Image (cartoon, rainbow, N blue to C red):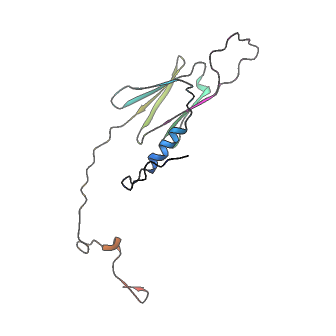
Amino acid sequence: MTTRMFTSPLFLGFDHLEQMLERASKTASDGYPPYNIEQISQVGLRITLAVAGFTMDDLQITEEDNQLVIRGRQTDDSQGRVFLHRGIAARQFQRAFVLAEGIEVKGAWLDSGLLHIDLARPQPEVRVRTIPITRPGVNGSKPNGGVRGSIVEGKPE
């Protein structure tokens, strides 16, 4: 059941934000693998996932429609091994993060069982633009959405 949040006519063009919020609510909430998100500079962010036992070949990072998706799939190497206790998870996972407009993925690396992904959030430039107000028919402006003239006997003037 989806609740429409941006139904007010004052929210013009925010339908993509509503879609992003819906997508974020659908992401897995099982908590595996655990992760941290930290701010490393004025414009830099870092996501760190604990992926013990995974190699670089077992991991895949993609950016899909403003969504950062990390997938992990290990091959089963437990044949011939007898575990008395198996506490290190060796299951596949998918973790997704919704990215704001303009966020760039700068790079990723695997170090001591931790997958680090660096992101950059460029500072928005302040943009102010004055819109001139003109009178209909003055300075080439056209009333009625740019339609000029009239139609006489089915032919434009």
Q: Which of 109 and 17 lies nearest the eye of the viewer? A: 17
Q: Quadrant of the C terminus?
A: bottom left
Residue farthest to the bottom, as pictured: 153
Residue farthest to the top, as pictured: 84
49 on left or right of 102: right
Residue 35 screen position, x and y as percent: 50, 24
**Location of residue 135 with respect to 70 vertically, above or below:** below
Q: Locate residue 53: give its quadrant.
A: top right
**Location of residue 3 with respect to 153 vertically, above or below:** above
**Span of residues in magenta:** 70-99
Q: Is residue 8 magenta?
A: no
Write the residue at 25% across / 50% down.
128
Q: Which of 136 and 41 lies nearest the eye of the viewer? A: 136
Write the residue at 76% across / 14% down.
80
Residue farthest to the right, as pictured: 80
Write the residue at 75% across / 17% down.
79
The prevailing secondary structure element of the residues shown in magenta is loop
78 on left or right of 12: right
Residue 147 screen position, x and y as percent: 35, 75
Residue 77 screen position, x and y as percent: 71, 19
Q: Which of 4 and 133 lies nearest the eye of the viewer? A: 4
Residue 70 screen position, x and y as percent: 55, 32
Write the residue at 26% across / 53% down.
129
